[in-house]
Image: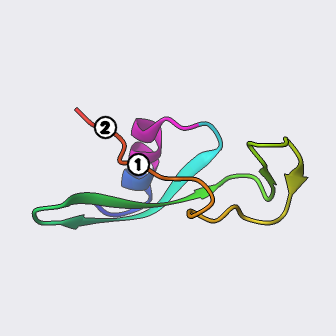
Amino acid sequence: MTGKRDIKILTEILDLSGVKVISHRLHVGIGMILKIEQEKSFSTCPKCGINSKRNWEPDDFPISPVPSF
């Protein structure tokens, strides 16, 4: 998969509100790795609900693999 059409399809499959796929890479033995970004320019803290332009770092909140079919 390459190109804008494929990235749009991956974004639809991921089906996360406000998140879009910007690139992808297929690794043999691992699977597909997606690079994603928010569609909005601010983040909302899940703990206190305050909006901020600061990006919450992955070590702030654990990220787990997304199950696929």
Q: Within the magenta stretch, is there residue 55?
A: no
Q: Residue at x 18, y 61 (%)?
A: 30
Q: Secondary structure at mark 1?
A: loop
* In this rendering, position of residue 46 left or right of residue 9: right
**Vertical placement of 68 versus 61: above or below?**
above
Which quadrant would residue 18 be assigned to in this image?
A: top right
Q: Residue at x 79, y 59 (%)?
A: 41
Q: Residue at x 35, y 48 (%)?
A: 65
Front-most of 6 and 33?
A: 33
Q: Residue at x 88, y 50 (%)?
A: 51
Front-most of 25 and 43?
A: 43
Front-most of 59 and 3?
A: 59
Q: Secondary structure at mark 2?
A: loop
Residue type at numbered disc 1: Ser
Residue 48: % across, % down: 84, 43
In this figure, which residue is indicated by the disc labeled 2?
Answer: 67
Residue 66: % across, % down: 36, 42
Residue 28: % across, % down: 11, 66
Other residues around mark 1 within 10 Å, as few (<14) / some (14–19) / many (≥20): few
The magenta span reads 8-16
**Vertical placement of 22 versus 61: above or below?**
below
Which quadrant would residue 42 be assigned to in this image?
A: bottom right
- What separation in Å lies between label 2 and label 1 (alpha carbons)? 9 Å
In this figure, which residue is indicated by the disc labeled 1?
Answer: 64
* In this rendering, position of residue 37 left or right of residue 9: right
Residue type at numbered disc 2: Pro
> Which part of the image, by quadrant, shows the C terminus?
top left
> Which part of the image, by quadrant, shows the N terminus?
bottom left
